[in-house]
Image (cartoon, rainbow, N blue to C red):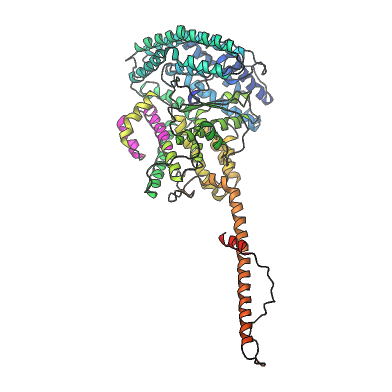
Amino acid sequence: MKSLFKKIAVLLIALSISVTGVVPSYADSKDFDAFLDDEWKELMESDYMTMHASVKDYKALGLTKPKVDMGDITYEEIAKEVSDAQESLDKLHEFDFDSLDETQQYDYLVYEDYLEKFIGVESYPEYIEMFRPITGSFTLVKDYMLDFALHTQEDLDDYITLLEDFPRVIDQMIAFTEQQAEKGYMMDDTTLDEAIGEIDDFVEAGEDNEMIVVFDNNLEAEEWIDDATREKYSELNRRIVLDKIIPAYEKAADAIDKLHHKRSAGKAVCSYPDGAEYYKWYSDLKCSSDEPMQDKFDYLTRLTKDVSEYYEGLIEANPDFEEPATIEGLESLDEVIEYLRNHMDGFPEGPKVDHSLAYLDESVSESAMAYYMQSPVDDINENIIHVNKDAVDDINTLYYTLAHEGYPGHLYQLTWYQNQEHSRLRHDLSMIGYEEGWANYVERIMLLRSGLDNVSAEVIACDEFMSYMTYAGADIAVNGLGYSIKELSSWLEEVGLDRSYVSSIYDYVVSYPGLLLPYGYGMARFWDLRCRTEAALGDDFDLEEFHLQLLTNGSRPFDMVEKDVREYVESKGHELPGEVKLFAGEDLSDAGSGSGSDKAAAAAQDQNQVRYILIAAAVIVLLAVILLVVMNRRRKKQREEAARKEALARPVIRDESPEAGDETAETYEFEEPDDTSGAEEQDE
């Protein structure tokens, strides 16, 4: 299979990494870095598709180019990958963990976690989906080809070679799926019909097919390609798509249409005899967490209740609120991304990198709102964000979507870590729960910096929270714990949500098991850590220091993230509490002043402004005091002059003594400010 499922693409879903070949033996910890580097080279050199997605110039890195094909999809190939991964894990365990330095220990634990979860998930090949919409390998390979980077003439030739290999792989997908179906492992009929519908749409597009239109656009975008070359490869691509790919799609639709009613179990994953065991591994992979399934569910239940109560309190405290306002002053993709990049207070400074930002072509049948394609390991500047204009139809949605994909979301987080010293293997070890959790976590922070009033920003953020956490909790409840619709309905009521949505939620999680787990669970973990750290440190909480703890060691399991945060809190003489109520300390009453919002973010953003305001206030007070003294002296002088004139008008009494406290006007001499400056001081 050669890591066919590993692709940096839609929703950043990387389903596997193949670890193949014989791993050399290493004697001691000084060879640990060499071991990781050899593992990475073995991965690159055994799988063309992974290498092309991960590396820009394989020759400069001293890599040997593997055969240009899409690999193989068979039960035997999957078993071999599991065996190879176990061999790598055994070699990893030969190292003495305590003899490694801190960075090596992180690499050890992350790689160990990845290999264990890979082995766990791939040990159940019946659950590896080929044709399931969005997450199936059939869709991911097509998307890989749409996003294929064209840097050189060699890349153009490789693209054509892969495209011609696609029908062979589709045949293997069909055969693999038929074998699964004979064992009773198959999509439910509703999801199967949806998959067939997507294939039919692809076929019916004909000359307007996305694989034709997008490839032509990609050719046009590359300035190094001359017109004659564009015309030649455009025609090559068009003929292969029309003559080979579309017939292969038609063959796939006919084949899987015959597999209706083949599912031997109920709709939920755990309804299979080995479903609960598989789903435990799958949810661990998706959540970047080894917590027991029931604990994950209870955790999401508690935090969803917290957000539901916070949302209810927000609305009650602002009874005149009707609907969120609209972000003003931003319209285009570039305007939004630059605004976000310029409002990164509270985040450690990252590298100055380039990016390509564009709407998807209308021909692309894309269900995702947007996606970020990670830069290759040897060029941090090649960052691509694509936005689905049909799904992002208002400025508020575009704003938090680009915060998720760009700054301070995926683009920032991944390039920040890539800019540090790290093993190249870590570039290709995606911890999707961490990565999607981070990107969802930062959405609320940036909404509170969008210029919206706080109630509007919080309502939008809470809608996102409730949606992702609800679907993540429902996914575990249904696919992991076997909840019926009735039980799921009771759970929705328990967490404070409308039960009328239960059917649509249930249908979604059985059609796309695990799809939203990394978003909901990961976001919950990050905000829970944030609130617990704020509770522990109080006024000592520093947002940038906190984010540094989250970012420094890269994408990793949440038990490692929590350990880092705990040690940071303890280094400041405090203790990280085990449980706090999410957003319990927020002030909900003021919609416009900043209270009830992201206090730590605002504090980090306005720290210098506060200092300047205090200095200005002190100056104003000093000027006011001086003005009062001047005015007082003037009044005294006026009284003295009036008294003198009055005395001159009266008869002279030579024995009259001055009254106690009388002073002459010449005692103090002040140079009074002019009338204009005095008026300005009073205005201030």
In front here: 169 or 280? Answer: 169
Residue 662 in view (yes/no): yes
Of residue 128 and residue 639, the one placed in the foreground of this image is 639
**Residue at image location 41% in from the left, 12% down from the top:** 203
Could you tell me which quadrant the C terminus lies in? bottom right
- Look at the magenta stretch and give its main secondary structure: helix
The image position of residue 375, as x and y in percent, is 58, 25
Is residue 491 on the magenta stretch?
yes
* Left or right: 133 as drawn, with respect to 344: left
Query: Extreme top residue here?
Result: 243
What residue appears at the point 34 percent right and 14 percent down from the top-left corner?
262
Q: Position of residue 330 (x, y in %)?
A: 50, 37
Query: In the rendered image, which quarter is residue 218 located in?
Result: top right
Residue 299 appears in the picture as rendered: no
Classify 636 as above or below 398: below
The residue segment tinted magenta is 465-494
Q: Count the marks: how many?
A: 0
| Residue 180 picture location, percent across and down | 40, 13
Vertically, is 637 above or below 223? below
Question: Is 488 a magenta residue?
Answer: yes
Q: Position of residue 675 (x, y in %)?
A: 61, 64
